[in-house]
Image: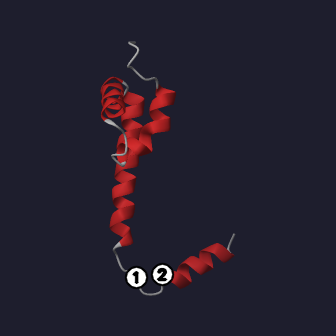
């Protein structure tokens, strides 16, 4: 590990900034290096990207008719 490398804890703290393209060049490069060698963090980043993309898609979809009542019924059952 070099002085520019990051560990899993650091990578997870910066993960959402990385996904949102909010890191500077050096931090972004360090994240890319870490993700290229750490399967666990790579899997987490991949999952979070897919989740973000899916949530973005759903935000633009119209809910099915009656969805609000089904949600209320489910919430009352708890």
- Quick check: 56 above or below 3? below
Quadrant (top left, top right, bottom left, bottom right) of the C terminus: bottom right
Q: Quarter of the image containing the N terminus? A: top left
**x then y, percent, for residue 28:** 33, 34
Q: Is residue 24 left or right of residue 70?
A: left
Q: Residue at x 39, y 54 (%)?
A: 51
Q: Position of residue 67 (x, y in %)?
A: 48, 81
Marks 1 and 2: in contact by CB < 8 Å? yes
Percent coordinates x, y for residue 37 in the rendering: 33, 23
Residue 31: quadrant of the picture: top left
Mark 2: secondary structure: helix
Residue drawn at point x = 39 percent, y = 62 percent? 55
Residue 5 or residue 72, whichever sits in front: 5
In front of the other: 11 or 50: 11
- Badge number at residue 17: none
By what rule are the colours in the image chosen? secondary structure
Kindly give the residue lying farthest to the bottom in the view shown. Answer: 65
| Rendered view: 18 above or below 51 | above
On screen, residue 66 above or below 16: below
The quarter of the picture where residue 33 lies is top left
Residue drawn at 56 percent across, 77 percent down: 71
Would you say 9 lies left or right of 53 here?
Answer: right
Q: Residues within 10 Å of mark 2 (few under 14, many from 20)?
A: few
Q: Residue at x 64, y 73 (%)?
A: 75
Q: Under tag 1, what secondary structure?
A: loop
What residue is shown with label 2?
Answer: 67
**Nearer to us in this view, 11 or 22:** 22
Whole-number angstrom distance, CA of label 2 to CA of label 1: 5 Å
Local crowd size for mark 1, using a 10 Å CA cut-off: few (<14), some (14–19), many (≥20): few
In this figure, which residue is indicated by the disc labeled 1? 64
Q: Position of residue 65 (x, y in %)?
A: 42, 87
């Amino acid at each position: 590990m070099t002085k520019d490398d990051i560990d899993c804890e650091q990578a997870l703290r910066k993960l959402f900034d990385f996904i949102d393209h909010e890191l500077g060049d050096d931090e972004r490069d360090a994240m890319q290096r870490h993700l290229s060698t750490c399967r666990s963090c790579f899997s987490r980043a991949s999952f979070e990207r897919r989740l973000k993309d899916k949530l973005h898609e759903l935000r633009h979809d119209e809910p099915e008719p009656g969805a609000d009542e089904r949600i209320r019924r489910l919430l009352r059952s708890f």
